[in-house]
Image (spheres, coloured by chain):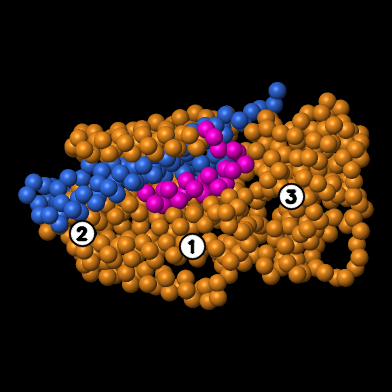
Amino acid sequence: MSANLAAFLYLVSGVLFIQALRGLSSPETARRGNVYGMAGMAIAILTTLFSIRIEFGSLVMILGGLALGGTVGAVIARRIAMTAMPQLVAAFHSLVGMAAVFVAAAALYAPEAFGINNADGSLHMQSLIELSLGVFIGAVTFSGSVIAFAKLNGNMSGKPIMLPMRHAINLALVGGAVVLVFMLIGTHGVGASAQSLFWILTLVALIFGVLLIIPIGGADMPVVVSMLNSYSGWAAAALGFTLENTALLITGALVGSSGAILSYIMCKGMNRSFISVIMGGFGETAAAAEDDGIERTVKRGAAEDAAFIMKNAGKVIIVPGYGMAVAQAQHALKEMAVKLKEEGVEVKYAIHPVAGRMPGHMNVLLAEADVPYDDVFELEDINSEFGSADVAFVIGANDVTNPAAEDDPSSPIYGMPVLKVWEAGTVMFIKRSLGAGYAGIENPLFFRDNTMMLLSDAKKMVEEINKAL
Amino acid sequence: MLAIASAVTVDPFVFRLAIFTLACFVGYFVVWSVTPALHTPLMAVTNAISSVIIVGALIAASAHAFMGSDAEVKAAFGMTRLFGFIAITLASVNIFGGFLVTQRMLAMYKKKG
C-alpha cells in the first residue's frame, strides 16, 4: 500500500471516530455511531497491516495478541455488571496508558521500524520530546487508573490518603521528569543510557500517577475517571505526533477533549474548581462541622406508610444516587414505578450530574432496568418541577439534595447545584443509616417535618414498598 | 513558481499540529452535543477508540533489523517486538471490550412504550 493511500485511510478512520462520538447526541443514533467506531478501528488496523512487511514470526505474535486480548475483552464486556461500570472504565484507561508506554518504548528501541530515525540511527529532539510526553502521560494514566480502580472496586478505602509534603513531592517528581527528558535528549535516543533514562522516566511517572490519585476522595471519583479519560487521549495524541499518524492524532484530540469536558461538567456539578479536586482531601476537613448540640428528631417511616402516601400522590419524582447502585435496587425501583403508574401516579426520575461514581452512571443503571429514557431528566430540566410533586423519593442519594448548598454559606458544598427535593410535599429518604454523605456533611432535610426516613437497605425497602402497593 | 515551492518547505510537524488543533475543536463541539444520559457510553467508546494506539504496536511487533546488523541492534529489535506484542494484547482488550460493552449499554436505552 502506498504511503499516500495509507495516510488517506487513516484520515477516513479518524473521521469515522468523530462520527462515533457524534452519534451519541441521542440514543437513537448512538448504536449506528458505535458501528462507525468499529469500522474506523478495523480500517486503521488493516491499513497498518497492509503497509508494513510482516515476517511469519511477527504475524503469529500479532494474531496471537489480537486473539488473546480480544477474547479477554469480549468476555469482560459480556459478563460485567452494569453497577461495576466505573471500575471497568478505570481498568480500561489503565490498559490504554500501559499500551502507550510500550509503544513509546518500541519507538525508542527501534526508531528505524517507525521511520523516525536520522541517518546515523539517532532520534530528532522533537521525536524524543513527543515520545517522552507520551510515556509520561501514559504511565500516569496507568498507575492513576489502577488506584482509581482499586478505590472504585473497594480494594482500597475511598478515603483520601494525605501524605505529608505531598505538593513538594509532586513538584519534585515533575521537576525530576523534566531533567530526565533533557538528559534523554542529550543521548539523542541512542544506546543503553537512553533506554535506562526512558525507564527511569516511566518509573517517576508511575509514582506521580499514584500520588496524584490517592488524596482524592470517593465523592470526587467522577472527576477522576473523566480526568484519566482525558489523559489517555493526550498520551495517544503525543504518540500520534511521534508516529506521524493522523488517526492517532485525531483520536487523541477527541478523547482528550472529551475527558476534559466531562471533568469540567463534573466539577461544575459540585461547584468545585478542577485544581481543588486535584489537590484532594475533600470530605476530611468538613466531617466535624455542623454539630450545634441541639437534639434533633427524625421521623422514621415504614414501607407501608411510604406505599400509602405514594399510591395517593399525583406526581412522584425519584432521585437515585450511588446507594441505589450499591444495593442493586434499580430493578425493584422500576417495578415500583410501574405499579405507581398503574395507580395513575405520574413518575419521573431526576438525575444530578455527579450522582454515582462516573458521568452518566445512574442513566445506565436505569436503562438496564428498562426505564424508558424519556422518563429520566437532568437537573436543570426537572428542578422547577419539585414544587408540583407530592413526593420526592430519594434513594441512595444525599449531598445532591442538601439545601445547605443553597442557604448555608459556611457549608463546604455551598453553591453546588442541588435537586430541590424539599419543595415537594413529602420527601422520602431511603438510607442505610442517618450518617453524613460522602462529603461528610449532615443533611438538615433529615430533620424536617415533611421528611420521612426509610432506614434500610435500598433494595429491601423498595421490595417491601412493592409488596405493600 | 517552482523555485518558490521548493524554497519554502514547511516542516510536516506544522501540518500535524494543524490536524491536532482542529481535531481538538471538533472534539470540543461534538462532545458538548453528547446527551448527559449517554456520558457513560461516551467514556466506554472513547476508551475503545483511543486504543487505535494499536497501530504503533503493530509496527513494533513486525520490526526486523536489517541483515548484518550488530547484536546490540538485533537485541533492541527483539525487545521492540516483545513490546509490540504486549501493547497489541492490551489494546485489543480495550478495543473488543470497549466497543462491545458500549454496544451492550446502548442496547438498553429504550423509548417509552
**Which label is found at residue A397?**
3
Q: Distance between the residues labelled 1 and 3?
A: 29 Å
Q: Mark 2 points at which residue?
A: A123
Chain letter of the residue beneath label 3 in the structure image: A
Q: Are marks 2 and 3 on the same chain?
A: yes
Q: Is mark 2 on a helix, strand or loop?
A: loop
Per the image, is A319 magenta?
Answer: no
The span picked out in magenta is: A78-99
Query: Image quarter for residue A183?
Result: bottom left
Q: Is label 2 or label 3 in front?
A: 3
Residue A244 is situated, as x and y percent measured from the top left of the image, at: 28, 48
> In terms of depth relative to the viewer, which is nearer, A16 or B25?
A16
Q: Mark 1 points at which residue?
A: A210
What amino acid type should be assigned to the residue bearing mark 1?
Val
Residue A402 is situated, as x and y percent measured from the top left of the image, at: 78, 56
**Which label is found at residue B52?**
none
Q: Residues within 10 Å of mark 2 (few under 14, many from 20)?
A: many
Report the side of A151 relative to B75 (left or right): right
What amino acid type should be assigned to the residue bearing mark 2?
Leu
Q: Are marks 2 and 1 on the same chain?
A: yes
Quarter of the image for the N terminus of chain A: give it: top left
Report the side of B7 relative to A396 (left or right): left
Report the side of A241 relative to A445 (left or right): left
Q: Residue at x 34, y 46 (%)?
A: B87
| Residue A286 visible in the current orientation | yes
